[in-house]
Amino acid sequence: MKHIFVSHKSSNAKLANDIIEILKSGMEDVDFFLSEKISPGDNWKANVVKAIRSAECLLLLYLDPDQDWSWCMFEAGLFSAYKPRNGTRRLYCIHHPESPPPGPLNEIQTTSTTLDSMKTFLESLYNTTRKMDPGPSSTNLDATASRLVDLLENCRPKKYATTHLWPSVLLRPAWLPTSRPDWRTVGVPKGLPLEQSEVYIEDPKSVDMLEFSTDPGTMNVVEFLNRLDTEGSEAERPWMGKFLESLQSALEGFMPDQHVVYFRAAKGNIRRPIIESIRRSDDGSECVCRIVFVDAFAPPPMSNPTRLQLLANGLRLAVRTRLEVLDKYRGTQWKSWANVFRSVAAFWKASGPSCSKPNCRAPDPMTPLPTCSVMTRSKRHTRGSGVSSNPGSPNSRP
């Protein structure tokens, strides 16, 4: 009896069993090993190793590359490492055409889920196990291959398209020039030259949402952020330094400790950069950060706002007033009034005192509201008016 070891993901257990039933229809005296058939209480690892060593063939169902295939690769490696004294052993790998086989199996001729490739696989399998398909005609071989292709196509894993709601970039942080990178959390030093980091936009939609006409490719992070901020090329941008401080903290393992920073984009909306995730290689040599740019202020609700929404809207308007009005025009009004005062002072100084009374002194040029020392609130100096300047006199007007 020939033995075939079937390596598969546990999520494909039913599919593997259906494939075995189709293959058995054209073969006799062949035993297929599935890990699900191991009896409860048995040492499953010992059973797997024993079955791999005794098998003439190993059939790997590599049907979803997005899953973790480390254990299946271990089984395939163990099968390839064991060399029997007599006979040859074959490793078969079935995969979908758009999903190439994993790297360790690049040197092996694999089988895609097409009719011609499946027929070639069946011919080789029958020849290796010396169990020919019943009947000399090729009709049965074609029917078996067609059943396998239809089964695998119906169980093809779904493909999902991801739509990012906010524009994003990938950032490769810069390391110290005097040592080799070690991006594991415990190995990240302080004071990294993060202003030398490189960024590139993640997808074409983000290129458009960040107001770039074309993909700019890889850019320096400071140059990139300057392109996003439209406050002017010579304007100071303290938020960039705070953002790089947040990046340093995130690389050290303090992801929540991010400064809340804002900038004005080209379309006028206020954006906030957020460090969403950090991907590190297991050896610490590579590191990539994903940065998303969200709208800092959401539009207020149109109807039936809750008290929390009203409070949030008030805070939103307060922050916008500070960022867009108070901080931007701080000191501008005082400078305007100072210019007016200087002009008035220059005029008074040039024209001299306007009052000829002996006891009236010239006003101080920097006094905002100059008044004569003998003037009253009811009447200025007049001659022959017949009205007393004393507010308490009978002749004074109310």
Image (cartoon, grey):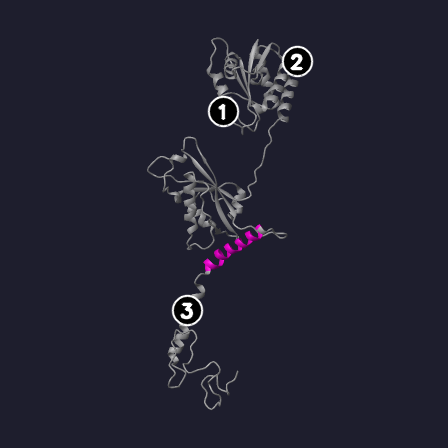
* Residue highlighted by disc 3: 338
Q: CA distance from mark 3 to mark 1?
A: 75 Å
Q: Which segment is the magenta one?
A: 308-328
Q: Nearer the viewer, mark 3 or mark 1?
A: 3
Res 283 quadrant in image: top left
Task: Pinpoint residue 109: horizontal percent, then vertical percent.
Answer: 52, 20
Instruction: Tell which circle, 3 or 1, labels the residue nearer the N-terminal end.
Output: 1
Position of 6 relative to 164 (above/below): above
Residue type at numbered disc 3: Ala
* Residue highlighted by disc 2: 137
- Mostly what secondary structure, the magenta segment? helix
**323 in magenta:** yes
Q: Quadrant of the N terminus?
A: top right
Circle 1 Cα neighbour tier, 10 Å, few/some/many (<14 / 14–19 / ≥20) = few
Instruction: Tell which circle, 3 or 2, labels the residue nearer the N-terminal end.
Output: 2
Rendered image: mark on residue 70: 1
